[in-house]
Amino acid sequence: MNKEISEKENCIFCKIINGEIPSNKVYEDEDTFAFLDINPVNIGHTLLVPKKHSQNIFDIETETLQKITPILKKLSLSIKEAVGADGINIISNNGGAAGQLVFHLHLHIIPRFSDDGLKHWHGKNYSKEEMSETAEKIKLNLKN
Ligand code: AMP
Ligand code: ZN
């Protein structure tokens, strides 16, 4: 069995999409699936996934990514309304170092409340040189 097949077969989110593992589904169409996160940061925390398996942002096809973006907007609005949130965080963890635990690309849609007490990461300082060198390196590495 090749690596790609075995990854898909053991993928918990593929199993949720296929209905092999139960979930609280909130949306489904031909290409996308969305369900409540089992350990919500706040009530209404939803995971939006493309049905086509890819691990994360590094291997997903652009076309697959494009298919989920209109649904991201639709769901963000409905989740905000449903739970009376004041805002929404949209987060995607890509790679183990970024905290990714499930290797099927997913977007966390997290309702936020003015008084929920959650804090954002602190920003670091850049020197001007390091900042412009970093921007140049990123530009050099841009591919189609
Ligand atoms: P991460 O890969 O770190 O972006 O997060 C994976 C997310 O999947 C976590 O927030 C988990 O709570 C969530 N999760 C894992 N298993 C399930 C499941 N069976 N149903 C719903 N959410 C899940
Ligand atoms: Zn999968």
Image (cartoon, helix red, strand yellow):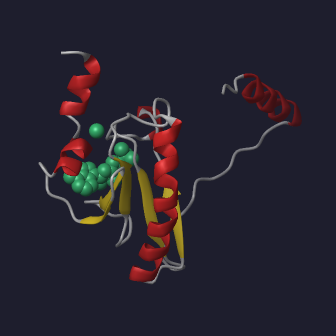
Count the marks. Answer: 0
Q: With 26 as the anchor, is 21 left or right in this view?
A: left
Q: Residue furthest right?
A: 128
Q: With 106 as the anchor, is 130 left or right in this view?
A: right
Image quarter of residue 13: top left
Q: Residue furthest left?
A: 20
Q: Residue at x 40, y 48 (%)?
A: 106
> Is residue 46 positioned above or below 124 on the image?
below
Residue 70 position, x and y percent, is 51, 59
Q: Residue at x 81, y 35 (%)?
A: 131
Front in this rendered view, residue 80 or 31 = 31
Residue 76 position, x and y percent, is 48, 68
Image quarter of residue 139: top right
Front in this rendered view, residue 88 or 64 = 64
> Is residue 28 positioned above or below 42 on the image?
above
Q: Residue at x 48, y 34 (%)?
A: 61
> Is residue 32 positioned above or below 138 on the image?
below
Residue 126 position, x and y percent, is 79, 39
> Is residue 95 positioned above or below 29 on the image?
above
Front in this rendered view, residue 113 or 84 = 84
Q: Quick one: quadrant of the N terminus?
A: top left
Residue 2 position, x and y percent, is 24, 15
Q: Quick one: quadrant of the C terminus?
A: top right
